[in-house]
Image (cartoon, helix red, strand yellow):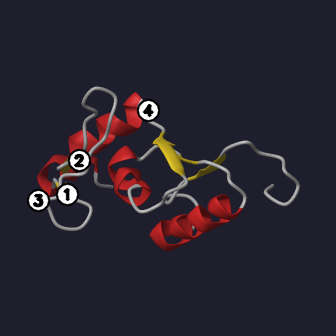
Amino acid sequence: MLEAGAVDVLQADATRCGGITSFLRVGPLCEARSLPLSAHTAPSLHAHLCCALPSACHVEFFFDHARIEQRFFDGALRPVQGELCPDLSRPGLGLDFKRDDAQRYAV
């Protein structure tokens, strides 16, 4: 897509394209071609990653993904005036799995 000039904005998703390492590898590809990078959903994950990539322009925010994050993770990010800001007081991605809340969905 990049070599063919087929995109104006490259969209990547760490939950679907090889994890955090692969997502972070997309940033320099975008920078080399002066293309913006858009993170696809999973806002509490991608907000942190986009802070490390100068080519990142935004994190796609779907209500259903955010609702799932809020339901199952303490520390899930909520937009404030249209911005997602990682909580730097929390370690790692700032998320703690709510095991008890998720247990009812176990199979």
Quick one: which residue is furthest to the right in this view? Answer: 4
Amino acid at circle 2: Phe
**Cα distance between the residues tagged 3 and 4:** 25 Å
Q: Which residue appears at 41% of the width and 47% of the height?
A: 42
Q: Which mark is residue 62?
A: 4
Q: Assess disc 2: are there few (<14), some (14-19) or many (≥20) residues with their C-alpha within 10 Å of its C-alpha.
A: some
Q: Assess disc 4: are there few (<14), some (14-19) or many (≥20) residues with their C-alpha within 10 Å of its C-alpha.
A: few
Instruction: Depth check: give the residue in front, 69 or 1.
Output: 1
Q: Which mark is residue 19?
A: none
- Helix, strand or loop for disc 2: helix
Q: Which residue appears at 25% of the width and 36% of the height?
A: 78
* Marks 1,2: beta carbons within 8 A: yes
Tag 3 residue: 89
Q: Quadrant of the N terminus?
A: bottom right
Q: Which mark is residue 72?
A: 2
Q: Which residue appears at 85% of the width and 60% of the height?
A: 3
Mark whose residue sits in front, 2 or 4:
4
Residue 103 place in picture, x, y as percent: 20, 52
Tag 1 residue: 97
Amino acid at circle 3: Ser
